Amino acid sequence: MRHDSDPKHSKSFGSMAGNLKDKEAYQRLNYLHQASHCVLSQNASNVELARFYSFTQRTIAKRLVLRQDPSVKRTLCKKCCSLLIPGVTATSRQRRNNKATRFTVIRCLSCGQTKTFLNNPEHCLWVDRPEAQMENQVQSDPKQSAIQLPKVDVSKQSEPNQDLPSEAIA
């Protein structure tokens, strides 16, 4: 079973949580992901239990509108919520369109759904870029970032404007 202190796997949910109020929810998602891996590693025939954990993980993430790391999303089948482990619950093949473009095709053994990923060594996910991290973003002045409503002169209007909120008219 993976632990949060493991630097190889701590990125999957830890970097997405940061100092958010949903840290407990991310920990729950991390636990469910680890549980589905653990169940399949102990017994490969426990596909249904691992699928239940993955389905619960996806349901919680959708309900709380949480972003999961792309490496986590790539290991789940979108159709049947199975954990995609090559050789156990999925097949992995290398395909080529032409001489330059190569793809990895992962096929779920439960439902037959396929995922295709481009093999480009120069490609960098947006999540992995420095500007995507919250601590690297420049903090702006909160007074400047506040939304400013346009000034409306009520005396020049012939009829009340129904589109503006009552705070903007008063």
Image (cartoon, rainbow, N blue to C red):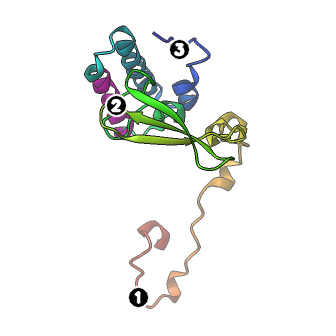
Residue 4's disc is 3
Considering only order in the chain, which callout, 1 or 2, is on the residue closer to the N terminus? 2
Q: Cα distance, mark 2 to mark 1?
A: 65 Å
Q: Cα distance, mark 2 to mark 3?
A: 30 Å
Q: Amino acid at mark 2?
A: Leu
In the rendered view, would you say 33 is above or below 128? above
Mark 3 against mark 1, which lies toward the viewer?
A: 3
Measured as percent of width and height from the top left, residue 19 is found at 56, 28
Q: Please tell me which residue is depicted at 53% across the width and 29% down the height of the picture.
A: 17
Measured as percent of width and height from the top left, residue 90 is found at 40, 28
Q: Is residue 137 magenta?
A: no
Q: Amino acid at mark 1?
A: Glu
Q: Is residue 21 visible?
A: no
Label 1: element kind: loop
On the image, numbered disc 2 is attached to which residue? 109
For the magenta stretch, what is the residue range? Answer: 50-63
- Label 1 packing within 10 angstroms: few (<14), some (14-19), many (20+): few
Residue furthest to the front: 99
